[in-house]
Amino acid sequence: MPRNRSRDRHGRGVRHSLTGSLYRSGGSSSDQFAQIVRTTCEYLRETFPEELGELNFRVMDAPVLGENSTYVKRWSARKETMTVILYRLPILRLGSSPSPVEERLKIEHHVFEAAADLIGKEPWDLIFGED
């Protein structure tokens, strides 16, 4: 007599998704990081078209560290190409972000810092606008 075998052993149900956590959250963490950077840069381009209309961005995993480095950069800015480079791993791994909202705010803050450095302003001038 053939028995109907399923993955539901002992009535506990299927415990894990076959695709893993990658597709449940809508993409990898690097994709989500890049999306946050992209939308923040779009906001800055639209809000400050004269100063940041040509803003470009790049996401890299980590900066190159020198032999005597005592600090890990979270971002860098290239004024000649109006490009900000965000370093994903230092931003996400150095420091704590207990919630996804705080993590997003941290990423956005670093984008604002880098963009402000490009045009010689304080990040708060971009966040709250100038009076």
Image (cartoon, rainbow, N blue to C red):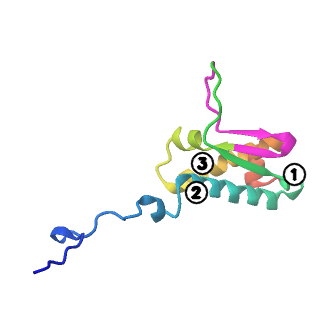
Secondary structure type for disc 2:
helix
Q: Which residues are magenta?
A: 68-85
Give the residue type at disc 3.
Answer: Lys
- 123 or 88, nearer to the observer: 88
- In this view, the residue in front, 78 or 106, is 78
Return the residue found at the far top: 68
Q: Point out the image quarter for the C terminus.
A: bottom right
Badge nearest the viewer, 3 or 2:
2
Residue where numbered disc 2 is placed: 32
Q: Secondary structure at mark 1?
A: helix
Q: State the residue position of label 1.
A: 51
- State the separation of the CA atoms marked 3 and 2: 13 Å
Q: Earlier in the sequence, mark 2 or mark 1?
A: 2
Residue 66 in percent (x, y) is at 65, 23
Q: Position of residue 14 (x, y in %)?
A: 28, 68
Residue for point 63% across, 19% down: 67
Q: Quadrant of residue 78?
A: top right
Residue 74: image location, x then y, percent? 64, 38
- Asked if residue 18 is positioned above or below residue 104 in the image, the reply reads below
Q: Quadrant of the N terminus?
A: bottom left
**Residue pointed to by mark 3:** 106
**Cβ–Cβ under 8 Å for marks 3 and 1:** no
Badge 2 density bin: few <14, some 14–19, many ≥20, Cα 10 Å: some
N-terminal of the pair, mark 3 or mark 2, is: 2
Q: Which mark is residue 5?
A: none
Q: Say which amino acid is labelled 1.
A: Glu
